[in-house]
Amino acid sequence: MAPKELAAKKARSRADYAFHQEYRTRWFDNDMYAHLNNTVYTMLFDSIINTYLISHCGMDPFTVNKDDSSGPAMKQIAIIATSYCDYFASVAFPDVLELGLRVERLGKSSVTYEVGVFRKGEDDVKVVGGYTHVFVERETMRPAAEGMEGSVRKGLEGLVKEPKAKL
């Protein structure tokens, strides 16, 4: 990653993110070096993204098809194609974290999310990461030819937020 792009991520603020969620770290989240284990960040990203997809995009995997009650109502699912994580400072139990979510890029059948991780009460971003989802047909596991479903796209449009440039 170019130094300029990394510096821009390190300058992120909570205002750069459209959706927010709090996470209370657990003793279990720490690794043997007394900071959050790398895998916990992936879980945090997954949690805030899926919370948003369920609450704002109608992608509840536990809702059954209203037509015949035989299976999930979702005809498409989202699969992770790529992921990334840039670390700027450490966090650890018993920190309370504030997560921010935005859409970096919204394509026809894919979306790239960005998550900012902040320690509650502190302004500096500790971690910026995320991943790209590709929406595929549940039956074939192939990218949706017509793109993602309209309700999902509409919900994700609410996360499109350009970061403010720092002067």
Image: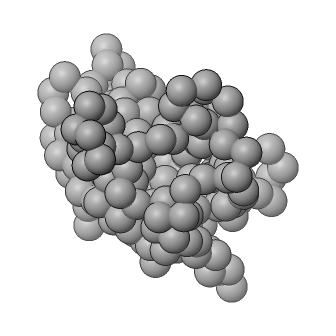
Q: Is residue 105 above or below residue 42?
A: below
- Specify the farthest residue to the front: 68
- Percent from the top left, x then y, of residue 33? 35, 19
Judge from the rendering whether residue 117 lies leftward or rightward of residue 12; answer left or right.
left
Work out whether residue 84 or residue 105 is closer to the camera in this orientation and state it. 105
Q: Residue furthest bottom?
A: 167
Please tell me whether residue 88 is drawn above or below residue 102 in the rendered image.
Answer: above
On the image, the x and y values in percent for residue 80 come to: 58, 33
Residue 27: percent from left, percent from top: 15, 27
Decide which of 70, 75 is in the foreground and name it.
70
Can residue 8 be seen here?
A: yes
Identify the image's colour scheme: rainbow, by chain, secondary structure or one colour.
Answer: one colour
Who is closer to the viewer here, 90 or 155? 155
Res. 161 image quadrant: bottom right
Quadrant location of residue 70? top left
Give me the residue at 60% from left, 36% from top: 136
Quarter holding the N terminus is top right
Q: Quadrant of the C terminus?
A: bottom right
What is the tally of numbered marks visible in this picture?
0
Question: Which residue: 30% across, 32% down?
Answer: 71
Q: Eyeballing the image, is 132 above or below 56? A: above
151 vs 90, nearest the viewer: 151
Q: Residue at x 62, y 80 (%)?
A: 164
Residue at 32%, 19% in the rendered image? 31
Taking the image as shown, residue 98 lies to the left or right of residue 109, namely left
Q: Position of residue 166 (x, y in %)?
A: 65, 80
Evaluate whether residue 13 shows in this view.
no
Q: Against 35, is 167 above or below? A: below
Please state if 113 lies on the left or on the right of 15 as rendered.
Answer: right
